[in-house]
Amino acid sequence: MNHTFIYDAIRTPRGRAKPEGGLADISPLKLLSVLYREIQHRNQLDPVWVEDVILGCVSQVNEQGGNIAKASLMYAGWPDSVPGMSVNRFCSSGLDAINIGVMKILAGQASCVVTGGIEMMSRVPMLSDKAVMFTDANVALSSRMLMMGSGADLIASDYGISREALDKLAYKSQQKATKATREGFFKSIIPIYNPVKKRTITQDECIRSSISLAQLAALPPAFAELGDSGVDALQLSEHSHLTEIIHAHTAGNSPSMADAAALVLLGDQSLQENLKKTPVARVLAVATTCNDPLQVVSGCTAATAKLMSEQNITVEDIDLFEIHEAFAATIIACQRELNIRSDKLNVNGGVIAMGHPMGATGAIMLGTLIDELTRRKLKTGIVATSGAAGIGTALLISLC
């Protein structure tokens, strides 16, 4: 029986998705080429051994269009024999790229696959693909395809989560990420030199270490106008126990847009002989599902629950959970639903603090989970992401 092993997981720092951001001057192709070189060097990897490259990317247009997985391989000068595939499962794309790589190895189709994700939101902004679901309000409402923040406000309303609780979660994320960065916990980060700004980016830039609860409380609701456009009415029509949608999410308790890329090297057991190294971890199981589309971002909870049910395990069997901080309400509801202790869940913060480069986030989170399991000398972990429309993916690993 084949098993899928993780041999390496690396990522760039997350840059602010603004012109002044540390990575904003670097094209997606160039950024990926740095990681390709690094994963070769760290593992003595001959690219000829790689039988597929699968990358998550949400906005597949302009610099990220034209199948960026294959285009980036050609740009980096990898052998023509290496195929590439780009995956869009919204914000679960990076984790689903890994999932596809796992399946290829389990099926015996490959013994070495590079997976991961890319999103340069300063250069290819969110919604650049102009999908009709997000540009035509009538289509969106009739299809029940809502923006992520609207789903988060529904979750907060449904679970009775106060604005104060949302801001407190965001504040804790900032504080945990600040501590983890200061103490060098994120070993999977590869420094990136920006030749335009003539500086090397070594840490995630989106963290707001000095922000206070008072500053968070002063921020205005971000999605009330969307609610007035017909979204509130649609959500209330399908959640008749609610009398109103509370608009409590702001720029402070929502994910930060970011630039980043990540790569994960997968292989079967035979790859050990070529690399002359033991794997870091083994992938034990993966689950994908779709939850209430009107909640939009609750899929990470549903996927985690499905994974644990299918594997007949409980939260007590898992050492650490790295679950997508897709808005503050998502994590608070997830913790309530699954009864995960705080000392097991997102112990170094999440994307509210560190940034959410959509197509790369899942692969980054996997690397973060491996970093922390290794640091604490623990064994098992679950990483889970939410995509739009209620989509969710979860992956269970065990360190080798």
Image (spheres, rainbow, N blue to C red):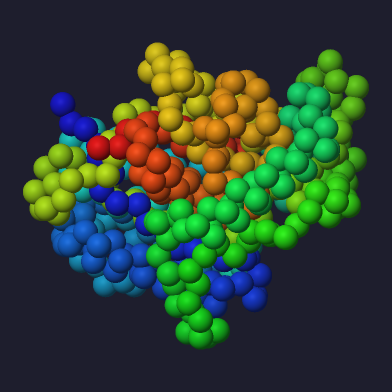
Residue 128, image quadrant: bottom right
Compared to residue 338, the image places residue 326 above or below, namely: below
Give the position of the N terminus as an image quadrant: top left
Who is closer to the viewer here, 91 or 252? 252
Residue 169, image quadrant: top right
Indicate left or right for 122 with 310 as reference: right
Identity of the residue drawn at 52% across and 32% down: 344
Indicate left or right for 282 with 11 as reference: left
Identity of the residue drawn at 66% across and 55% down: 256
Residue 153 place in picture, x, y as percent = 78, 36
Q: Is residue 146 visible?
A: no
Residue 10 place in picture, x, y as percent = 37, 57
Counting the numbered discs, the total is: 0
Compared to residue 366, the image places residue 27 above or below, namely: below
Identity of the residue drawn at 62% across and 28% down: 334
Give the residue at the far left of this rendering: 273
